[in-house]
Amino acid sequence: QVQLVESGGGLVQAGGSLRLSCAASRSFFSINAMGWYRQAPGKQRELVATITRGGHIKYADSVKGRFTFSRDNAKNTVYLQMNSLKPEDTAVYYCKLDSASGRDYWGQGTQVTVSS
């Protein structure tokens, strides 16, 4: 069993920044990928960014150039630096771990609210 704990959400004005963290209860050694997803009210959960075990990062077009995904293997933690935030970035942000066994794990989510 893997536990993921997100933190760093909050309320920020448009144009501001936040950094989300996701701490995993296990090493990244046996994972395939980790990702950040978000779900706005009344909308489906969508991909924000993913990072593979090899370090390849992919971003949704809507966040390219504004968000940066990084990881600290020593701390089993990934980060999502979010700059130039827009009201449409308002959502609950979730961390996801794709394990080598094929099982997926999700965090509890952290709320990000961007005011105009």
Image: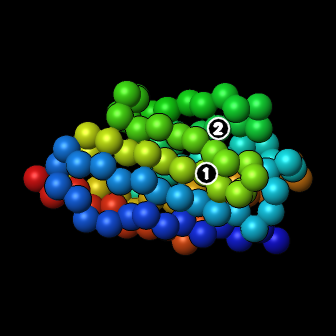
Residue 16 point in image, percent of width and height:
23, 48
At 71% from the left and 57% from the top, the residue drawn is 75
- Circle 2 Cα neighbour tier, 10 Å, few/some/many (<14 / 14–19 / ≥20): many
Compared across the picture, whether 62 is left or right of 110 comes to left
Quarter of image, res 38: bottom left
Q: Residue furthest left?
A: 116
Question: Which one is closest to the eye, mark 2 or mark 1?
Answer: 1
Viewer-proximal residue, 27 or 74?
74
Compared to residue 107, the image places residue 85 above or below, namely above
Which quadrant of the rendered structure holds the N terminus? bottom right
How is colour applied across the structure in the image? rainbow
Residue 85 point in image, percent of width and height:
26, 45
Residue 31 point in image, percent of width and height:
81, 48
At 50% from the left and 44% from the top, the residue drawn is 47
Compared to residue 33, the image places residue 18 above or below, namely below
Residue 62 point in image, percent of width and height:
35, 33
At 72% from the left and 56% from the top, the residue drawn is 76
Q: CA distance from mark 2 to mark 1?
A: 9 Å
Q: Which residue is mark 2?
A: 51
- Circle 1 Cα neighbour tier, 10 Å, few/some/many (<14 / 14–19 / ≥20): many
Quarter of image, res 15: top left
Compared across the picture, whether 114 is left or right of 70 comes to left
The three-letter code of the residue at mark 2 reads Ile
Q: Which residue is mark 1?
A: 78
Contact check, label 2 and label 1, Cβ < 8 Å: yes
Compared across the picture, whether 108 is left or right of 98 comes to left
Secondary element at image label 1: strand
Of callouts 2 and 1, which one flags the residue occurring earlier in the amino acid sequence? 2
The three-letter code of the residue at mark 1 reads Val
Secondary element at image label 2: strand
